[in-house]
Image (cartoon, rainbow, N blue to C red):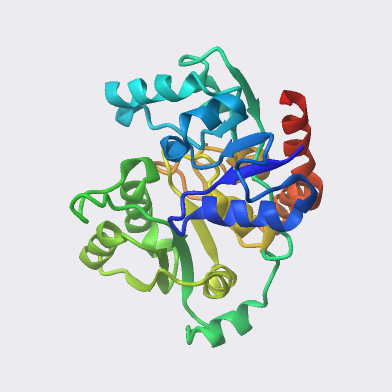
Amino acid sequence: MKVFVLAPREDWICDRLAKEWYENFIDYSTNNIYECDIIWLLAGWCWNHIPEDLLKSKKVIVTEHHIVPEKFTQQKFHNFKLRDQFVDCYHVPNSTTENFLKQLTNKKIEVISYWLNNKLWAPIDKDVARKKLNLSKDDFYVGSFQRDTEGSDLKTPKLEKGPDLFCDYLVRNKDKMINLHVLLGGWRRQYVEKRLNEANIKYSLFEKSDIDTIKLLYASCDLYIVSSRYEGGPQSIIEAAAMKIPIISTDVGIANTILSQNCIVNIEKDYYTPNKCDVLYAYEAVNKLSIGNHGNKFIELFKDIT
């Protein structure tokens, strides 16, 4: 059994997952789509880059990361149904996406969380990380490393990512976080930057940073916040948990499978600072998803459909 993985080549998480798959499961992988038994559309929106005769002649698995109902237009539904005729099975990372998909298709849907690359994500000393980034030892650093402004105008908030909720939380609770300083990673952070400037909250932007810098940013955090309304993962929960970073999250994606219930918060009302037990709980939970172990669930899925 050989799997060909279609990645979007957008320098996004899908590209990293595809790379990790090929590095860790050589015996089950091929870079030649004509030699594969299974086409894994890890970037399902790129499905029409593949010739129709190949889609018909191979087994096809699509990963549907998450769906934003408010953005699921009639045109997107039409495109979904066009692709669905070639699909043998859907993979989703969480039950919320599964429940939405059940309204759209009668094809098999398998829920498997993303894996942890434990060779990449592991704890780093906070003082060492802050020194390397020239950050103060005394500030209270809150992290957010994602893309949360719409690309159409670079000012409208990408509401599914909850940048408005993130900023509201910081503004409402900034007096509880002495010397608050926000660390922003990723790109398209214009909406958050504007809100933080208006609230006179310190921040540092590390735009489009490499993985090594992102690891140092995580390690520098006193708190990481996921404020999303819809998510597939997010991957930040896996990464922060593996690095033993205190993290709170809305009840999205895989959050409730990794974080303690204390750390699943109503971000519009609640305030919570994770304790050492919360951090250890998440660390132990996420390490059960290590790629060498958890990746076998994907292999089992692929074998089931061949």
The correct choice, above or below, for 223 with respect to 93 in the image is: below
Could one spot residue 138 in this view of the protein? yes
Residue 224, percent across and down? 52, 59
Residue for point 60% across, 36% down: 39
Residue for point 67% across, 39% down: 36
Residue 32, percent across and down? 62, 48
**For this view, does 196 lie left or right of residue 101?**
left
Q: Quadrant of the C terminus?
A: top right
Determine which quarter of the picture holds residue 247.
Answer: bottom right
**For this view, does 185 lie left or right of residue 247?**
left
Residue 169, percent across and down? 38, 52
Residue for point 46% across, 49% down: 8
Determine which quarter of the picture holds residue 61.
Answer: top right
Q: Nearer the viewer, residue 41 or 210?
A: 41
Q: Quadrant of the N terminus?
A: top right
The correct choice, above or below, for 159 with respect to 125 in the image is: above
Could one spot residue 274 in this view of the protein? no
